[in-house]
Amino acid sequence: MTAETILEIENIELTYKGSIQALRGLSLKVPKGQIVALLGSNGAGKSSTLKAVSNLLSLENGELTAGRIRFNGKDTAGLSPHALVRSGLFHVMEGRRIFEDLTVEENLVAATYALTGRGGAPADFEQVYDYFPRLKERRHNRAGYLSGGEQQMLAIGRALVARPSLILLDEPSLGLSPLLVEEIFTIIAHINRETGVSMLLVEQNAAVALAISQFGYIMENGRIQLDGPTERLMADDDVREFYLGQS
Ligand code: ATP
């Protein structure tokens, strides 16, 4: 029996206006409750895949010319990014995208407003602070003064406020020291285990991503080159040489 699928991408093709074709018949699945890693070198099309899922392509003059995407069994074509957030799909963008002039807690409040409208649900951020005690310590500090790692924690915390069923995580390791990367990935795995939230994790750091994922896809030039359970990928000679830096 296969696990239920929360996200299914089927043969999508993407072209940016005036540019090359960025995705060329890409398919992948995220089973419910699992972490799936999407790996590949610079420019392979990983971020574009996530933007296709959260319907953010039109903001960048990108267009899907073929294929379809289903979230919880429903076709996402035509749904606004906001409607997708409300239905449980949250995209943590590359580069973190937090409000630097607001405090940590105000950033979390803003994430709540985005879901419920002003004056909506009471602010209960204890779950976020349980996972990220550092954010609790810094909750009255301006987000712009946080370290890169703390800003990444805040970006993930903003996703948790939305209580999503699927999180798209774009390069959480970007610009962080190895120690912080390990800390954040340990917390990501912990959140997945405790809440059951599914994750599609885009990473250039294949080793840390595979360490917390159950399944991985490796893409090059807009299509999947190789996929499999993480143990199989980690034992593959080409993966070890080209993506894990081992020989
Ligand atoms: P990176 O790790 O560098 O972000 P990536 O695997 O996420 O790489 P994408 O950012 O998805 O790759 O880019 C895939 C291709 O699409 C690249 O050739 C890139 O130049 C192109 N591309 C991405 N965004 C745009 C855009 N807004 N307009 C035009 N071309 C774009």
Image: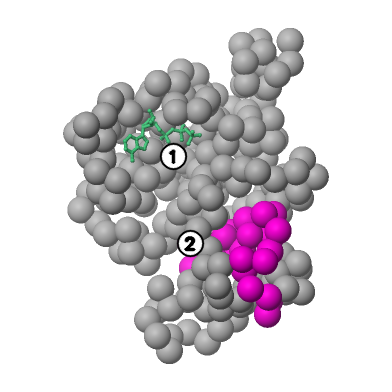
Mark 2 C-beta to ligand 1 under 8 Å: no
Magenta-span inclusion, residue 184: no
Label 2 Cα crowd, 10 Å radius (few <14 / some 14-19 / many 20+): many
Residue 227: image x %, image y %? 51, 23
Residue 151: image x %, image y %? 63, 60
Residue at 67 percent of width and 13 percent of height: 241
Residues at marks 2 and 1, CA–CA distance in whole angstroms? 19 Å
Is residue 152 or residue 193 the one in the foreground? 152
Residue 186: image x %, image y %? 73, 49
Magenta-span inclusion, residue 141: yes
N-terminal of the pair, mark 2 or mark 1, is: 1
Is residue 137 or residue 225 the one in the foreground? 137
**Secondary structure mainly formed by the magenta segment:** helix
Residue at 25 percent of width and 57 percent of height: 79
Horizontal placement of 162 versus 115: left or right? Answer: right
Residue at 68 percent of width and 22 percent of height: 244
Q: Which residue is mark 1?
A: 47
Residue 156: image x %, image y %? 58, 59
Is residue 236 or residue 55 the one in the foreground? 55
Give residue 208's quadrant in the image: top right
Q: Which amino acid type is shown beneath numbered disc 2?
A: Pro
Q: Which residue is mark 2?
A: 164
Give residue 49's quadrant in the image: top left
- Disc number placed over residue 65 in the picture, else none: none
First to last magenta residue range:
139-166
Horizontal placement of 209 versus 93: left or right? Answer: right
Quadrant holding the C terminus: top right
Label 1 Cα crowd, 10 Å radius (few <14 / some 14-19 / many 20+): many
Image position of 155 with respect to 104: above or below: above
* Residue 217 showing in the rendered view: no
Q: Which amino acid type is shown beneath numbered disc 1?
A: Ser
